[in-house]
Amino acid sequence: MARRKTKESEKIMGNILPGLVRDRGWETQLDLHSIFPVWHRVVQGDAGKYAVPLKIVKGTLWLEVENSAWLQQFQFQKISLLDSVNAFLKKSSIRDIRFVLPSGKEKESTSVEKVRFKAPARDELKKFEEQVAFIEDKEIRESLVQLWYLSKACVRQKK
């Protein structure tokens, strides 16, 4: 019974949705965004592997590329990418393509941090050793103490 209702609901929705999409003027937007799930088929080769569509704003497709080397490479392929995308679209077109790097990646690569060593106070070490004394396995207990010691002793300094 529930299966039958589901099929009937799907049939009703299938009849209503195309008209709703057309009446609301969503056809163009749906066509534009239809490239997102099939991106690797829309553009062949490297573009499908090293670039992913992020958004479409005012006729401009924004692609996130893996790194700055690929960003440079895709600048040279911009026209052919634009042609491939527009050949796929049926009711709309893309006027421009912009390339961006993943947010945060560029900062990570340019930020250099130094680590300096500063031994923790002996009384802190003794206190921690007392806290973990209940651990029966000597190897695990010593490893935990070493981990604690290194976490306290290694201090990051931005260069």
Image: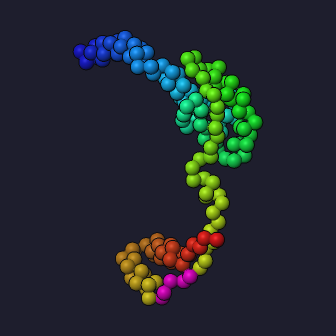
**Residue 119 lies within the magenta run:** yes
Describe residue 91's horizontal placement relative to residue 109 as left or right: left
**Residue 89 lies within the magenta run:** no
> Hey, which residue is sitting farthest front in the picture?
58
Q: Is residue 11 above or below residue 118?
A: above
Q: Position of residue 143 (x, y in %)?
A: 50, 73
Q: Can residue 142 be seen in this view?
A: no
Residue shown at 65% from the left, 66% from the top: 112
Q: Where is residue 96 in the image (x, y as percent from the top left)?
A: 64, 31
Q: Nearer the viewer, residue 145 or 136?
A: 145
Q: Position of residue 52 (x, y in %)?
A: 59, 37
Residue shown at 72% from the left, 29% from the top: 79
Q: Where is residue 78 in the image (x, y as percent from the top left)?
A: 71, 33
Q: In which quarter of the image is the C terminus?
A: bottom right
Residue shown at 71% from the left, 37% from the top: 74
Describe residue 133's horizontal placement relative to residue 35 as left or right: left
Q: In this view, does 130 lie above or below 156?
A: below
> Hey, which residue is sitting farthest left in the picture?
1
Segment tinted magenta in the rendering:
118-122
Q: Is residue 111 above or below residue 18?
A: below
Q: Which of 46 and 77 is in front in this view?
A: 77
Count the marks. 0
Q: Is residue 86 above or below residue 147?
A: above
Q: Quadrant of residue 32?
A: top right
Describe residue 93's horizontal placement relative to residue 68 as left or right: left
Q: Quadrant of residue 84?
A: top right
The chosen color scheme is rainbow
Residue shown at 64% from the left, 38% from the top: 98
Q: Nearer the viewer, residue 2 or 34?
A: 34
> Would you say the magenta stretch is mainly helix, strand or loop?
loop
